[in-house]
Amino acid sequence: MSYFRKSSLVATMILGLVAAQFAACSGGGAGSDVRTGGSNSGSGAGSGDGTSGGPGSTGACGLTQASGVPTAGPAEGAWTGAFPIFSGVDLVFGNGVVTAEGKAVFNVGNSELWVGTVLATEDGAVASDLTLYKRPSSGGAGGLKSPGDPTPEALVFDHAKARTALSGAYQGPLSNCQDVRLGYDDVYEQAASLQEIAGVYTSAAGDDYTLTVTVHDDGQLDGSDTRGCVLMGDVSVPDATKNVYRAVADASSCGDLDGHYDGPLSLRYSAGRLSWLDLALTAPDKAIFYRLSR
């Protein structure tokens, strides 16, 4: 998916439309409200008793995050929406998953991958340990950990409502803040099985690059791309009632991306039919991520 480059005015208008869709349930204020000021000093969970979701530390954009939250709670699920990146001027549509353990993966425009932890109660949420991976301009199967802006604290979630909305703010490199509103996608509740995910998935980037991944009936995963990169691994079903799969894979002949990976896979549906597979495999300093069609 390509970036949608808009002027600042148009970006704000689109944010307002996204917010209008979810504002009634999100409890986080108007989506077109531009946050200003605040600190980019951290997104930690703060102090707490390990069970409550009361006030905690201040994260990016001055948002107060919950403290002492032990589980994903209402943040669990599949989410989709608009991410204002590049100083909040450009809108990039993306989607992601927060697992029952709080593992969070967000594929933003198929060009950036945000990975971390999102925990929540109905009173608040906290995002932590966020890592950004960027696909290089040359394209390819994945990207390396981003060493510079935006920092891992730039994306903060401070509110979650189960099966409704996940909201927070993004602080761009120029310290300007924009609301982030993600809506729940009930695709998360689709039953999972190796038979359901089995198939051949392909992505053509339009620049003579193609990645093909096959998931076999027994869960074996293999793949390759037009640059000689090879993937070999396995897919498993952690919970048959939730549309999240776990994959482990080794990458070889991939240059800087060689290594051992793991991460969630999720299927997305349109009009009741399978539309694509979201692949999000990570290692400490690199990631292989793509939206693949079957």
Image: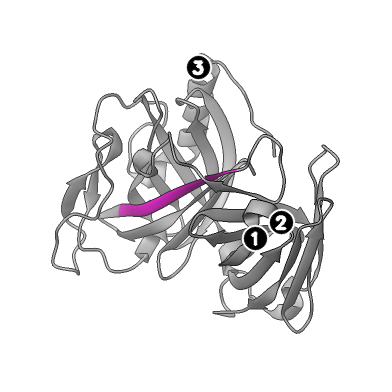
Query: Which one is nearer the viewer's eye here, 120 or 30?
Result: 120
Q: Which quadrant holds the N terminus?
A: top right
Residue at position x 17%, y 51% from top? 56
What is the distance, in whole Å, between disc 2 and disc 3 at their CAs?
38 Å
Q: Please indicate whether residue 225 sits to the left or right of residue 54 in the image.
A: right
Residue under pointer 3: 8
Nearest to N terminus: mark 1 or mark 3: 3
Residue pointed to by mark 1: 258
Residue 98 falls inside the magenta stretch? no
Q: Residue at x 62, y 41 (%)?
A: 111
Label 2 sits on residue:
254
Give the mark nearer the N terminus: 2 vs 3: 3
State the extent of the magenta-drawn residues as a range: 126-134
CA distance separating discs 1 and 2: 5 Å
Identity of the amino acid at label 3? Ser
Q: In the structure shown, which secondary structural element does the residue marked by tag 3 occupy?
A: helix
Secondary structure, mark 1, is loop
Q: Who's the residue at 19% across and 69% down the image?
A: 51
Q: Is 61 on the left-hand or right-hand side of 136?
A: left
Residue neighbourhood size for the residue with mark 3, other residues' Cα within 10 Å, grouped as few (<14), some (14–19), many (≥20):
few
